[in-house]
Image (tube, rainbow, N blue to C red):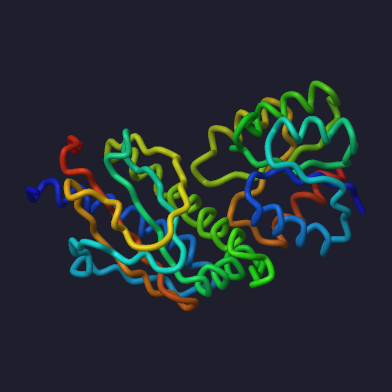
Amino acid sequence: MNKKHENIILNRAISIVNSAARILNDGIVEPSFYPADFLPVKNIDLGDFASEFCIDHNCGGKVFLAASKSTVQNLSLALFGMPITDEDGEEMVQDGINEILNMIIGNAAKELEELGLNFGETLIPTKGRLTDISSSSTQYQIGVPTEVGELSFVFSFNNSKAVK
Amino acid sequence: MAKVMIVDDSRMIRKALRVFLEAGNHEVVAEATDGEEAVRNYHKFKPDLVTMDVSMPEMSGIEALREIIRIDPNARVVMISSLNQKDLVVKAFAEGAKNYVLKPMSKEKTLAVIDKVLQE
């Protein structure tokens, strides 16, 4: 992967994480994003709950948002003023993280479009380790600490796709 | 107190809106998870106001809004949208929506918009 490709990925990641900061800033500590933390990784453990979103045409690029069950429950309370309890079931928790990622991507959409991306709206609930990502893709992870727990953003890009 | 129908494909958003509306002493008379169900339920329950998600499977919020306005030109529909859906919200206003609420929505802001629409 060349430097230009890495910079493009970094810009995309910054847009998305900054959108998360804008949303999360309402009552929650603004997450700090350190470029030095943006490292390529493999075989990422997504934790309890995750959602996958297509941020490039043909899903050549994807972003996963992962968080523990308690973090999603607390985020729902902080963002929507509505608690998700254990009685609501795991479906509601998964729904919660889908909504949160959808909002974050929605906020980042404008910046991503300015970078020349046709971002998609595929939202796929995903749990567990990222073992289904093929060796032809590269994954980067950013951990975003908040008052209610850590969010993990995982960016996955298919190396064979052309990058704008 | 108003009779309200909630239309959203997200269980979490439907629950949040129900909690907000009941806290504001409104009655949730129906829910719908897509536009087609929303139109059917509008016929059946005749709510005073509808909260409508902009993006839904099968029939979108805009299409459902159009159908509901066709049935009842005085229908009060408040759109629920994300920040990147501004163009769709503008389109919704052109189709007859009365107001909108952006996600993440707070109870106070949601009730303020709904109460404003009900008073108009």
- Classify A96 as above or below A33: above
Q: Nearer the viewer, residue B21 or A56?
A: A56
Residue occupying the point 47% across, 78% down:
A147
Q: Which quadrant of the view contains residue A40?
A: bottom left
Whether residue B12 is situated above or below residue B29 in the rendered picture? below
- Residue in the image at 33% along x and 53% along y: A15
Residue A130 position within the rendered picture, expressed as x and y whole percent measured from the top left: 31, 58
Q: Nearer the viewer, residue A47 or A80?
A: A47
Q: Is residue A137 left or right of residue A112?
A: left
Q: Is residue A109 left or right of residue B76?
A: left
The answer to which image quadrant residue B7 occupies is top right
Quadrant that contains the C terminus of chain A: top left
In the image, what residue occupies the spot 52% across and 46% down? Answer: B83
Picture coordinates of residue B102 (x, y %)?
Answer: 60, 49
Q: Residue at x 59, y 37 (%)?
A: B55
Q: Nearer the viewer, residue B73 or B12?
A: B12
* x and y percentages locating residue A81 in the rendered image: 65, 67
